[in-house]
Image: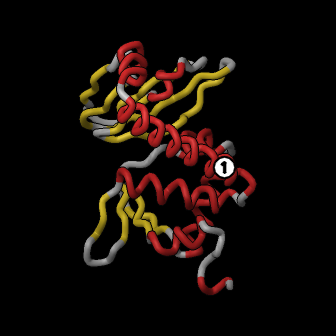
Amino acid sequence: MLRLVRGAVRLDATLRGRTVPSGWYRGEELIGEETAYEPTYRATAIPLNPTSIVQLPAGVLRAALASDAALAIAWGRLAHERLVETQLRLGALAAKTHVRLAGFLLDYARRFGSQELETNKLVLADRPTASQIAAYLGVVRQTVQRDYDKLEELGGILRVSGGLCLHPEMLERIADQEGPPSSR
C-alpha cells in the first residue's frame, strides 16, 4: 500500500492480462488500501506530476488492524466509501455515455482542477487523455470525443486553450440524469 504525500498519480490495474485505468489519486490519499485484504491483481501507479510516495507494508497494516479496534473501524469506513464509489460507478454503466463522462469530469475536476471563485466554474488544465477516459468508462475513444461535443452543446463544458472550463451545476444535472433545464 502507498500513501501519496504530494503530487498526483493514475492507477492502472492489470487483471487477466488487460491493463486499464482504475483511478486517479492526489496528495494525502492512500493507494492500494485493498492490500490489507491481499488482492489478486497487479496495479501500477503512473505519476502525473512530481510526486512523493511512502510505502506502507501490508503485513504491518494487517497487524495494526488486528490489534487496534479504532483503526479497524476507521479502515472499515474507508473500505466502505471505496466500495460505494465502485458500486456507483458500476451502476452508472447503464447510463448514457455522456452522463457517465459528465460524472467522471465533475469528480476529476473537483479533485484535480482549480475553481474560479468569481464564476464558480472549475478549470481543468490537465486531464486524462480520451483513450484513458474511454478505458476507465468502458467505451471507445471516439465515444469520449463525441460525448465531449455533446457536453459542450448542453453547456456543461467549454473547451479553452490548454484545457476545459466546467460548469459544475450543469454537469451535476447531467450526471444525475436530470439533463439541462431546457430539456425538462
Measuring from the top left, give residue 158's x and y in whole percent.
46, 68
| Rendered image coloring scheme | secondary structure
Measuring from the top left, give residue 129's x and y in whole percent.
50, 43
- In terms of depth relative to the viewer, which is nearer, 30 or 153? 30
Q: Specify the amino acid type for callout 1.
A: Gln
Furthest-right residue in view? Answer: 94
- Near mark 1 (Cα within 10 A), the count class, few <14, some 14-19 or many ≥20, is few
| Direction from residue 2 to residue 85 in the image, left or right | right
In the rendered image, the vertical position of residue 42 relative to residue 124, given as above or below:
above
In the rendered image, the vertical position of residue 9 relative to residue 169, given as above or below:
above
In the rendered image, the vertical position of residue 9 relative to residue 95, given as above or below:
above
- In terms of depth relative to the viewer, which is nearer, 120 or 65? 65
Question: Helix, strand or loop at disc 1?
Answer: helix
Q: Who's the residue at 41% across and 13% down the image? A: 59
Measuring from the top left, give residue 67's x and y in whole percent.
37, 21
Determine which residue is flagged by label 1: 142
| Direction from residue 5 to residue 143 in the image, left or right | right
In the rendered image, the vertical position of residue 25 relative to residue 183, given as above or below:
above
Measuring from the top left, give residue 146's x and y in whole percent.
65, 58
Q: Who's the residue at 33% across and 20% down the image? A: 56
Occupied quadrant, residue 166: bottom left
Q: Who's the residue at 45% across and 27% down the image? A: 32
Occupied quadrant, residue 25: top left
